[in-house]
Amino acid sequence: MELNLKGKVVLISGAAGVRESIGETILQALAKEGAIPAIIDRNARGFGYVAELQKKGIDASFFQTDVTEPDQIKAAVAGVVEKYGRIDVVINNVGVNDGAGLDASYEEFMNSLKLNLVSFYLVVKYALPHLKATKGNILNIGSKVGLTGQGGTSGYAAAKGGVLGLTREWAVDLVKFGIRSNAIIIAESWTPSYDTWIKTLDKGAEKLKSILNKIPLEHRMTTPQEIADTCLFTISDKSSHTTGQFIFVDGGYVHLDRALLSE
């Protein structure tokens, strides 16, 4: 299917994660479709990713940015526009389940919100004039934690709930400009960080089996590639009349009847 993403400038935050992370997988999928990824991330790993893409003749840019710092976000967005003259899509992909629970300090809770929620707001705020010019669209990467809770992670849960609120608010606010705003909701996805977490547990294999048994469709985790594929479809012209939606890529984890769960 032709998604018509070739030459589209896609500003994506949090895409300099480790190999096969969700952000890095989305980055590679964008490049494969001929889009122009403009990465903002604090990890210098992004320089290497962009160099690799450029060696293949793919246009991409990296703007090293601490997304908890408003001035750095503003400068990064300005840098993208200075280089390409446009922004067609914003993908807010930052997300760190930092465990800032009720026992966390005020500063830890606020830092979680700055990273996982406020950065989404600021990226869109500074990119908005350019999205208006291109009638672009916004895609926020969310989490089931914003809907279901998890325990022990008040900051992340509040932030991800806020991301869903912003998604709908922006869909309403920006409809008059022809700008779409949607969110992808992820539940259990097998990423390098998930693998690392499982390995820290005393009975990691048992915990993993328990989690898999609770995923109705095929009793397996969602792959980052499946998430990336849905992201690309959602930002493309093939989803041109979809806005204000929460799109669940989770194997039925959040919504399906609990009678489907394995013993």
Image (spheres, rainbow, N blue to C red):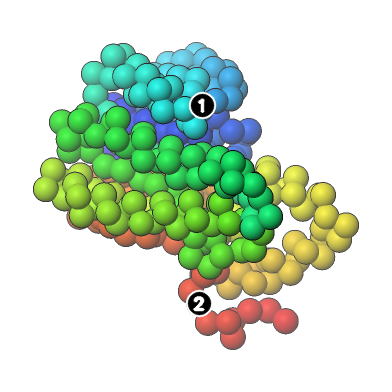
Q: Secondary structure at mark 2?
A: loop
Q: Which mark is residue 177?
A: none
The percent position of residue 134, horizontal first and vertical second, equals 18, 33
Position of the C terminus, as image quadrant, is bottom right
First in sequence: mark 1 or mark 2? 1
Instruction: Please report the residue visible at 49 percent of the width from the left and 32 percent of the height from the top.
Output: 68
The percent position of residue 40, horizontal first and vertical second, equals 45, 27
Q: Which residue is mark 2?
A: 256
Alpha-carbon span between mark 1 and mark 2: 38 Å
Instruction: Please report the residue visible at 36 percent of the width from the left and 40 percent of the height from the top.
Output: 121
Q: Secondary structure at mark 1?
A: loop
Kindly indicate the quadrant of the structure image that contains residue 217: bottom right
Q: Is residue 89 left or right of residue 114?
A: left
Q: Which amino acid, by three-letter code, is at mark 1? A: Asp
The percent position of residue 253, horizontal first and vertical second, equals 55, 69
Residue 235 appears anywhere in the view: yes
Q: Is residue 209 left or right of residue 180?
A: right
Q: Which amino acid, by three-letter code, is at mark 2? A: Leu
**Label 1 CA crowd tier, 10 Å (few <14, some 14–19, many 20+):** some
Q: Which residue is mark 1?
A: 66
Going by the picture, which residue comes out furthest to the bottom?
Answer: 259
